[in-house]
Every structure is written in C-alpha cells, then in structure tokens.
Image (tube, rainbow, N blue to C red):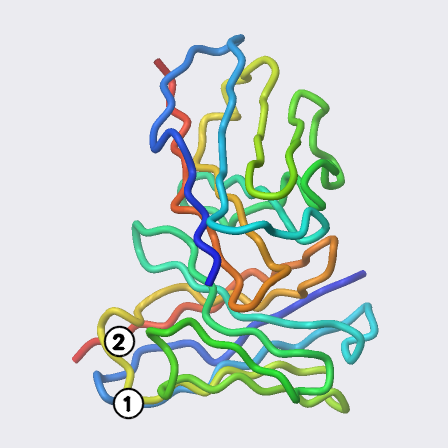
Amino acid sequence: EVQLVESGGGLVQPGGSLRLSCAASGFTFSSYWMSWVRQAPGMGLECVANINQDGSEKYYVDSMKGRFTISRDNAKNSLYLQMNSLRAEDTAVYYCARDSVLPVWGQGTTVTVSS
Amino acid sequence: DIVLTQSPGTLSLSPGERATLSCRASQSVSSSFFAWYQQKPGQTPSLLIYGASNRAAGIPDRFSGSGSGTDFTLTISRLEPEDFAVYYCQQYGSSPYSFGQGTKLEIK
C-alpha cells in the first residue's frame, strides 16, 4: 500500500525552527518528485516547495524562500522540510505529497507558531 | 509562476442539480499533472480527478473532469447531499506548483 506519514509538527515560538519529516512506503520513493503543501486554518491549499528525484532541483513559493528548505534522503525513503524563522502565519497543517500523475498525500502534521 | 483562478467562488445549488466548476490557468498547464480535490469541513482534502479527466478510485461517475491548456472544468452531474464541500484545482506540472483559491459548493 502506498503510504506517506508526516511527523515533526508541534508548537513553536515565533522565530523558532522545526523540521518536518515524511516517511514513504509502498512505492519506489527515489523515482518521484515530492512536495510539501500546507493549509492554514480556514484558508485554502498552498504549495510550499517541491523537489526532484535526486534532490538536485528544488522550488519554493516566494513567501517561503530563504526560510524553508526541502530535502530528501532516498536511502531512508524520507522527505524533509526544515522551517526556520517561523511566523504566526506559518501556522498550518503541512502535507507531504507524491507528485505523480496519480498524486498521493499524507494525512498531515500540524504546526502551530505562537508564543 | 502559474496562477489558477477558480470560479465561481461560491456556488449555491440544490441536491439533484448539475454543478459546473471552472479553473483557469494564467498559462498553459500539462493535463497530465492537473487535479481536482474535494475537502469537507475538518477533513483532509481528497483526490477526485487526476490527469484532468480521470476519476480517482472510489469516486462516483457523477463526477467528471475535462479541459486542457488553460481551461479546466469539474462537473457534478446530479448533486448528492454529500457533495456540498469546497473544491480545489491544482497544477503540478510546472514548478512551483499552484492551487486555485477554491470553490465552495453550498446547499441552496
């Protein structure tokens, strides 16, 4: 069964850092582009970043450039999102996604930025 | 960057009616990497349509997707009570990926 499981969310103070992880199983992880998507409370869906199969290409939405870093470890079948200088507006559910013709999403992990 | 604009923002219809939701892209997108999602309150978005016109597993045939280039449509042929939700389009063929702002389908 194809599965993506996010972890690492939690409560963090403004200006703090957090590293999200996504564990992939049931498919050849190294063959797919992957991405992070987020949804703030009461808001729409927003693409955060995406990465190619070997990690050599990375793209970010402008508002997250310089603060967020997407990476992957194909040996561990894992995707990561390092989030620095967090702001209240980064509070959201963060989803990991497989960017295939038939996309697959995880269930999400919640990040709350608050003092 | 590609901007997706969904219309209308809110659609008020009655069960049994036909719903037509539109998603327009600021430039041509790959149909292979175009999807529609449904989200009900408090739930994770669920995949409805992928590849612009393919229904995901378990999606009833009253849902259909069409379009190419810059104009895409999600049609629900006969609304059931469980179909009232928010619908999002997404393109993930050109980085950075993008979503539409959503169409809320509400009961009239």
Where is residue B79? Give x, y as percent: 54, 16
Where is residue A35? Give x, y as percent: 58, 70
Q: Residue at x 77, y 76 (%)?
A: A29
Query: Mark 2: which amino acid?
Result: Val
Where is residue B4? Give x, y as percent: 45, 48
Relative depth, front residue between A73 and A107: A73
User: Which residue position is annotated with label 1?
Assistant: A16
User: Which residue position is annotated with label 2?
Assistant: A113
Is residue A90 toward the left or the right of residue B96 in the image?
A: left
Is residue A40 toward the left or the right of residue B94 in the image?
A: left
User: Does the CB distance between marks 2 and 1 fall below 8 Å?
Assistant: yes
Which chain letter goes with mark 2? A
Quarter occupied by the N terminus of chain A: bottom right
Q: Residue B75 falls in which quadrant of the image?
A: top right
Whether marks 2 and 1 lie on the same chain? yes
Q: Residue at x 46, y 39 (%)?
A: B40
Q: Residue at x 66, y 20 (%)?
A: B62
Callout 1: few (<14), some (14-19), or many (20+) C-alpha neighbours within 10 Å?
some
Quarter occupied by the C terminus of chain A: bottom left
